[in-house]
């Protein structure tokens, strides 16, 4: 339960997930942000105005998955590290999962990284496809991990230093 352990329930996740049809259409952002706090960098960052907080800055962000093209600008801007991009069209076997990463060492492209689910459990070893530096000011990197499609909605981070 989210309030007790920080892990969203299936019901929590169902409220923010894109439809299967939208997932099949290309990369899309998913805001797994479930707390009403005053925060809106993702809204300001989105070049397509696909992320909104309809009533107040204290609302949780809502992603219009039809407007979103999965560019990922929002991923590095979220101070809660709660936004991810999933591209189920990456290949026949694999999806690409992009997530924020603020630890060192930063994995390198081509390395294998130990993927973790929302509970921190190891899901397997997956190839790092891309690393985008957050820059000197932000310092939130965006890691793109190539994962089997059946794990794309589960893998949400990597084990720090768990690279080979």
Image: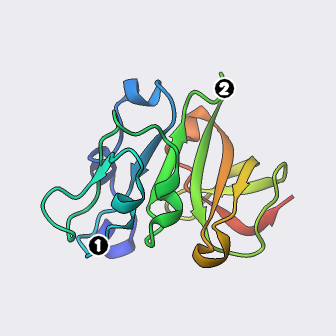
Q: In which quarter of the image is residue 21?
A: top left
Q: Where is residue 140 in the image (x, y as percent from the top left)?
A: 60, 69
Residue pictured at 32% horizontal, 75% vertical: 4
The residue that label 2 is drawn on is: 91
Which residue is nearer to you in this view: 26 or 128? Answer: 26
Residue 82 against residue 110 in the figure, above or below: below
The local secondary structure at tag 1 comes to helix
Residue 138 position in % (x across, y down)? 58, 74
Mark 1: give few (<14), some (14-19) or many (20+) Cα within 10 Å. few
What is the quadrant of the N terminus in the image? Answer: bottom left
Comparing 69 with 84, the one in front is 69
Q: Residues within 10 Å of mark 2 (few under 14, many from 20)?
A: few
Q: Residue placed farthest to the left in the image?
A: 55
Any mark on residue 116, and which? none
Q: Which residue is drawn at 81% across and 52% down?
A: 109
Callout 1–callout 2 Cβ contact below 8 Å: no
Residue at x 23% of width, y 70% of height: 36
Percent of width and height locating residue 104: 74, 76
Coordinates of residue 3 in the picture (x, y in percent): 29, 73
- The residue beneath circle 1 is 3
Judge from the rendering whether residue 25 lies leftward or rightward of residue 90; answer left or right: left
Judged by depth in the image, the label closer to the viewer, 1 or 2, is 2
At 49% from the left and 52% from the top, the residue drawn is: 84
Report whether 55 appears left or right of 30. Answer: left
Q: Does 35 appear above or below 150?
A: below
Q: In this view, which residue lies farthest toward the front?
A: 47
Under circle 2, the secondary element is loop
Q: Nearer the viewer, residue 56 or 82?
A: 56
Colouring mode (rainbow / by chain / secondary structure / one colour): rainbow
Mark found first going from the N terminus, 1 or 2: 1
Label 1, label 2: how far apart the Cα atoms are: 36 Å
């Amino acid at each position: 339960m989210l309030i007790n352990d920080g892990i969203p329930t299936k019901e929590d996740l169902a409220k923010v997930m894109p439809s299967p049809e939208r997932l099949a259409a290309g990369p899309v952002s998913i805001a797994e942000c479930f707390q009403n706090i005053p925060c809106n960098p993702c809204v300001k960052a989105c070049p397509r105005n696909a992320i909104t907080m309809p009533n107040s800055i204290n609302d949780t962000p809502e992603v219009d998955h039809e407007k979103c093209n999965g560019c990922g600008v929002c991923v590095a801007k979220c101070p809660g590290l709660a936004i991810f991009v999933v591209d189920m069209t990456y290949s026949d076997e694999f999806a690409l999962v992009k997530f924020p990463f603020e630890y060192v060492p930063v994995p390198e492209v081509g390395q294998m990284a130990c993927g973790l689910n929302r509970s921190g459990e190891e899901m397997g070893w997956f190839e790092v496809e891309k690393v985008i530096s957050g820059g000197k000011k932000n310092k939130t990197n965006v890691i793109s991990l190539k994962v089997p499609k059946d794990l794309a909605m589960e893998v949400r981070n990597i084990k720090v230093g768990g690279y080979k």
